[in-house]
């Protein structure tokens, strides 16, 4: 098993290096981060030269990449370069944004994955039943809706609910502008009330889309497995339906959902842009939008590298899980 993990790691390292090179090239193609600054008012040649020397944009492309990559692996992710916003630590800013996004995404992914697996398995076992038709219709409807549309509908509903609560003399519950920056305060009951009000809408918006994806994959995979010869043989030997489903079919049917959920979770960490924008969360999504708007190359690079690392790491986790679920994979 250890040799298998080492082999997968050896494959992941070149992928990460290639991803870093592509990310650096794409970030460089964004444009000159000092272009707007130069046009705001007349700058002296000395000011312009000093600014470009500070950012390193006078150096050749490969030299800049080598300098950035060397600093990045040692923990120096650079600083913001645009004058007026310069000097902010990219690593610290991403760390703060990542914590906000991770808390949101981890809950949404767990709920979506569990619901998707349960609904997918039941739909496959009870194929063409009323439950299967209903679950399939709901999944397709959720999957076909754009995320921003789901988020806006939920936000509108949350505002209406708050107005109704106020009309009956209760406190407003749903938070539609992000969690409080100074954290939740008060006793356990008050904090729980604030926590659920802040997280419920963005969590549901992410769960809706992910649930539709997971349930469809789980149902299709379970149907293929239930029709496999070894499952039919187990049932022909007198093994109960429940045991043949969960002991023989369910384990192998998990392999595709492991792939999808692992890659999807890594991508969602850096891709919750729409949800965070609609609900006013200061997470990775807002961080990326602000960085692109300001043409901050090191901030965009930091975001892209965090996303790339998570995708590669969770892909590695999926490969390792395969080894436990599928005995046909060689571990020596």
Image: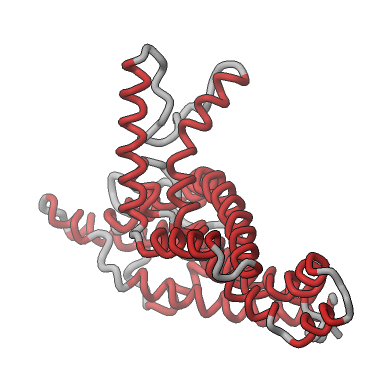
Q: Residue at horizontal 33%, vertical 68%?
A: 57
User: Where is residue 155 drawn, in percent x and y?
Assistant: 34, 40
In the rendered view, would you say 35 is above or below 6? Answer: above
Q: Residue at horizontal 54%, vertical 49%?
A: 108
Residue 115 can be seen in this image: yes
Query: What is the quadrant of the N terminus in the image?
Result: bottom right
Q: Quadrant of residue 316?
A: bottom right
User: Where is residue 100 drawn, in percent x and y?
Assistant: 51, 43
- Left or right of 190: which side holds 27? left
In the rendered view, would you say 96 is above or below 260? Answer: above
Q: Residue at horizontal 39%, vertical 54%?
A: 273
Query: What is the quadrant of the C terminus in the image?
Result: bottom right
The answer to which of 194 and 248 lies nearer the viewer is: 248
The answer to which of 271 and 70 lies nearer the viewer is: 271
Residue 324 can be seen in this image: no
In the rendered view, would you say 157 is above or below 51? Answer: above
The answer to which of 7 and 150 lies nearer the viewer is: 150
User: Where is residue 317 drawn, in percent x and y?
Assistant: 69, 68
- Left or right of 19: which side holds 43? left
User: Where is residue 84 drawn, in percent x and y?
Assistant: 28, 44
């Amino acid at each position: 098993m250890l040799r298998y993990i080492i082999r997968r790691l050896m494959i992941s390292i070149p992928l990460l290096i290639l991803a870093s090179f592509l990310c650096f090239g794409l970030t460089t193609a964004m444009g000159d981060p000092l272009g707007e600054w130069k046009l705001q008012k007349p700058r002296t040649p000395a000011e312009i030269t000093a600014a470009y020397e500070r950012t390193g944009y006078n150096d050749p492309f490969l030299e800049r990449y080598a300098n950035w990559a060397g600093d990045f692996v040692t923990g120096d992710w650079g600083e913001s370069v645009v004058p007026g916003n310069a000097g902010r630590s990219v690593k610290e800013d991403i760390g703060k944004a990542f914590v906000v996004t991770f808390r949101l995404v981890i809950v949404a992914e767990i709920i979506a994955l569990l619901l998707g697996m349960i609904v997918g398995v039941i739909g496959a076992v009870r194929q063409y039943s009323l439950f299967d038709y209903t679950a399939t219709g709901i999944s397709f409807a959720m999957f076909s809706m754009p995320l921003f549309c789901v988020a806006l509908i939920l936000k509108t509903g949350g505002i209406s609910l708050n107005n109704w609560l106020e009309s009956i003399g209760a406190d407003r519950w749903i938070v539609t502008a992000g969690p409080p920056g100074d954290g939740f305060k008060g006793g356990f009951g008050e904090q729980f009330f604030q926590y659920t009000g802040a997280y419920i809408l963005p969590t549901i918006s992410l769960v809706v889309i992910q649930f539709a994806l997971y349930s469809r994959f789980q149902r299709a995979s379970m149907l293929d497995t239930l029709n496999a010869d070894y499952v039919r043989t187990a049932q022909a030997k007198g093994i109960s339906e429940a045991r043949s489903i969960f002991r023989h079919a369910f384990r192998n049917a998990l392999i595709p959902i492991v792939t999808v959920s692992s890659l999807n979770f890594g991508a969602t960490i850096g891709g919750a842009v729409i949800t965070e924008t609609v609900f006013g969360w200061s997470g990775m999504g807002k961080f990326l939008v602000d960085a692109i708007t300001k043409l901050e190359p090191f901030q965009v690079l930091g975001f892209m590298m965090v996303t790339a690392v998570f995708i590669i790491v969770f892909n590695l986790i999926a490969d390792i899980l395969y080894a436990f679920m599928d005995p046909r994979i060689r571990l020596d």
